[in-house]
Amino acid sequence: MDFIRNFPFFSIWMPMVAGPVSSVLSGKKARLLNWTVVVASGLMSVATLVYVLSTGESFTYTMGAFPAPFGNEIRVGILEAVTASFFCLIMVLSLVGGHRFTKVDIPEEKQNLFYIMINLLLSSLLALIYTNDMFTGYVFIEINTISACGLIMIRGWGRNLLAAIKYMIMSLLGSGLVLISLSILYGITGHLLMEQMHESIVEIVQKGTYTEPLTVAVGLFCVGIAIKSALFPFHAWLPDAYGYSTCASSAILSSLVSKGYIFLLIKFFYRVIGAEIIHTIQVDDVLFVFGIAGMIFGSVSAIQQTDVSRMIAFSSVAQIGYIYMGFGLNTEAGIIASIFHILAHAAGKSLLFVSLNGLTQGTWENANYRLLRGSAYRNRIAGIGFAVGSLSMVGIPLLAGFTSKVYFAQAAFGAGSKVKMLVTLIALAISTILNAMYFIGQVINIYTPIENAEKKRYAAGASMWFAALAFIVANLVLGMGSQPIFRWIERGLSMFS
């Protein structure tokens, strides 16, 4: 059984190697290699989850012959294994669901380049989840950024190139702030491994030395991650990046990339700085304010869109706001609700983008609101998938989004501040109403028959059927069977500290 301890490293290493190998393969062979690697990484992540659940303990994997504090480590607990397993599942379903559109949108000679980026992205996401070294985290932040930028611009359209440039500029700004933060923390602690860094920070706070540099470092790190994860008002790059990419890219970017950065932020709060110190320097209050603002203004911006792909993209700004709002509550229940929302949002948003591409068949890939009227009758599985994803985002009972909002409401009642409790509940209510305005309105639109319209239907294809049904099941499982997952997150979070 101890051999399973190698699986997290293998799951990072395999896609990292598969990326360069794909450069000399044809598009079909690169796709086969990529899908094999993603599935294998997912199976190893599930095996790792079963292992840590059975042992009830986290473990560290030391790379090379250099132990802490000099070597590099991977740390694996229940929370890491759950997140890695879910990320692999979402990635493979997004690739399967967008398979038809990938072949159409990307020329054959560029297909292998697409799968190079997917491999590197998977490797970086898993590394951000498992790493126990902050500088290693920064390195894979950069790999994640470059891979995501490649996925945005792979179509080669003018809008995609412009979106990639905007994404790269904002991401590099965020990366620079993270690097400055880590440089300050290394200067005052002398460590890069999380546990050793945390011990030094606790000692610094107790002695009252370097408190200003510590506060600056925490602030820079949070702002850097906020930019990279598109927290309001740093979200200007997001609508074009998500809205104009090919189907699989949009599904993966919207559901996974930002969440990898946010997971590293959770580790930074709990394993590097400490929740009490975060509360002392009032970072949680700042994140709470911007999270609430994102929930409202992201939805307001979504309502104003006539292009449905941009509408879905702007809704991600609101959903990111939910996650940061949970952080701002600075309670265990708030963090657990945010982590659960990461999973719920990933399952729902990927379903929306995959389904939307099915609905645009017959509209020349135009996602204009008017052109999509009655489109659910042309592609029935896409219509059902879009409806389920939309209702989940709104928070209709039995679906993942509803359960997530219930957890946020429960966390609000446990917040130490009555002001935060009231603001959270009011923001949840307003955001839900705004979500309903644009999501349910669009569901009604796609199911509105058009008189004298051509009764043509488009075959969804086996890949879209499989992906859409799997995403629907994932939303139902998260909605109706959330208790085991909630308990895993709770146990995993307790292992963090």
Image (spheres, rainbow, N blue to C red):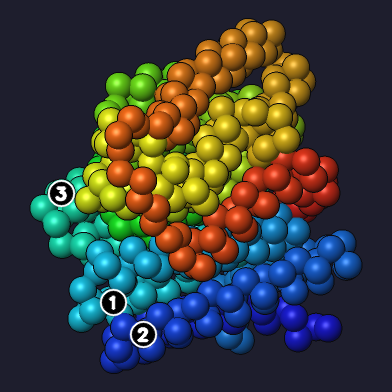
Q: Residue at x 28, y 30 (%)?
A: 370
Q: Position of residue 193 (x, y in %)?
A: 57, 62
Q: Residue at x 62, y 28 (%)?
A: 395
| Lateral position of residue 4 relative to residue 100, left or right | right
How many C-alpha atoms fall within 10 Å of the one at disc 3: few (<14), some, or many (≥20)?
some
Q: Position of residue 253 (x, y in %)?
A: 40, 53
Q: Residue at x 31, y 83 (%)?
A: 27
Q: Which residue is mark 1?
A: 111
Disc sitting over residue 28 in the figure = 2
Q: Position of residue 199 (x, y in %)?
A: 66, 51
Disc sitting over residue 266 in the figure = none
Considering only vertical position in the picture, is 55 above or below 317?
Answer: below
Considering only vertical position in the picture, is 60 above or below 307?
Answer: below
Please name whichever residue, 285 or 126, is drawn nearer the observer in this view of the structure.
Answer: 126
Question: Tags 2 and 1 in contact by the CB under 8 Å rule?
Answer: yes
Q: Is residue 441 visible?
A: yes
